[in-house]
Every structure is written in structure tokens, then in C-alpha cells.
Amino acid sequence: MMSGNQIEQLNDREKFHWYQNAQNLFWKSPIWEVQTKFNAEFNKKLLDEIYSIGYGIATGQDKKPKDSIWDYDKPNLNIIKQEIIDIVTKTITQQIPEIRMLNLKGCEHFFGWVNVHEPGEGLEVHGHTESAIAATYYIQAPEGCGELVLFDSSNAIDWKNTTLTGTPVVKERRIKPIEGKLVFTPSYVLHGVTENKSNDLRISLSTDLRKVVDKNTNNTVILKSWASRMKKIKEWKCSQS
Ligand SMILES: [Fe+2]
């Protein structure tokens, strides 16, 4: 067994593999919470912009509704759009070894939308697909408007215990929404929202992000990573003789 100092001396790739083997984790489920610099005045303008987009689509004034909220060009929407990219990219590249090794260029918004929950409404448990990171920014969050509940299956089972003496427990993490807060997780993390028990609307902006990899670096996992192996199909025997 290695000491803490010995582990620290490993490079990122060795450390990651050692950690995976030592901990025997199937996966880890990081959940990040960041309180942004945006205040109530910013959020009010953002809500005005979002309302005007929704009004235009719902009334038919917007003849060609766009697919994603990010496809609309509005001042505060553009600001929060870029801020989410900056915060998510900085956080995941600093904290996840595999992503550091990939020389990630950044993230890009794949699809963004707005959640508006009336009193009495919640959201069933679900995961997000076709993306790497799922993020939510809270614009309006009155007291009691419903918590974000995330489920983490990692470490739920004690693999060293060969007899099932206890019931595996999936951990849940509850996050109380705060206006101006950004919460993000890997997209596979299942989550839901509890009932809005306030007497006002609960409004948040959600987005699915994809990673953008620098394809010019040597360790990027794209087809060229396998090129030397593919050449062996016809050249390997020649090199043996
Ligand atoms: Fe969601």
C-alpha cells in the first residue's frame, strides 16, 4: 500500500488509475455549487428577456422560434451564457484528472431552456442525455420553492462484504436554490425537484454542455490515436522478419 506522499508523486494518469483501483469505484459523482456575481437587478433584466422570448413564441409574433434559449441574442442572456461556460470549464479542468489530460479547450452549450414551476409543481427524477455536463442557474427562488435532489450511486455497495447484511443505500444530496447560484453535475447524475410550496414562481435556466477537446494535442482520443495500431494490419509481420 502506498503512502500519501508516494501517491502525490504519481503523475495524473497514474494517480487516476491507482485511485480507481484502490477505491474500487465504478464512478464518482461530483456536484458543484457556485454562487455567481449576478444580483437581483441582473436577474430581473434576464427575466424580462426570457419573458419577451416566450411571449414572442407563444403569440406567434416570433415566426421562426429557435431550438435553444441560447440561440436568442439578448444582452443579459449572452452574459450568463458566457459566464456558465467560463465557470464550468475552469472547474472541471482543474478538478477532474482525465479532463486535464485531454487538454480540454472548453465547453459549449448544446441546448438551453427555462423551467418555470408554479406553486404545487415539482419535477420527477431524470437524467440528461447527449451532453457531458448539466447545469442550472437560479433566477427566481422564493423560500420553500422546492429543492434540487441529486442521487449519487457511487459507494452505495460495500464490495468487500460478500454477504448482504445491509441494504445498499443510494446517497441523495439536497440543494436549496439560491438566486444567482449555478449548480452543475455530470449529465448522468439523476435528479429531480421537490414541490414548490411557496406562493410564487420558481424560475431557473438549465443547459446541457458538451466538451470541446483540442484535437491538435497528442493524447486526444480521436481516430489518429489508433493510427499506428491500424498500420499493423499489413505491416506487423513484415517488421518481425
Ligand atoms: Fe434536469
Image: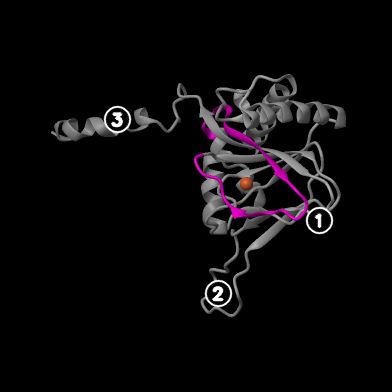
Q: Position of residue 164 (x, y in %)?
A: 55, 78
Identify the mark nearer the N-term, 1 or 2: 2
Tell me, yes or no, if residue 170 can be seen here: yes
Mark pair 3, 1: CA separation:
60 Å
Q: Which residues are magenta?
A: 101-130
Q: Are marks 2 and 3 in contact (CB under 8 Å)?
A: no
Q: Which residue is mark 3?
A: 228
Give above or below for 73 relative to 136: above
Q: Position of residue 17 (x, y in %)?
A: 51, 48
Q: How many marks?
A: 3
Amino acid marked by disc 1: Lys
Asked which secondary structure carries label 3, the reply is: helix
Identify the residue at horizontal 71%, vertical 25% (top origin). Answer: 77
Q: Tell me the number on the disc at residue 197.
A: 1
Q: Which residue is mark 2?
A: 161
Asked which secondary structure carries label 2, the reply is: loop
Identify the mark nearer the N-term, 3 or 1: 1
At label 1, counting other C-alpha atoms closer than 10 Å, the crowd grade (few under 14, some 14-19, many 20 or more) is some
Identify the residue at horizontal 44%, vertical 26% (top origin). Answer: 218
Amino acid marked by disc 2: Asn
Q: Per the image, is 106 magenta?
A: yes
Please name whichever residue, 160 or 44, is drawn nearer the observer in this view of the structure. 44
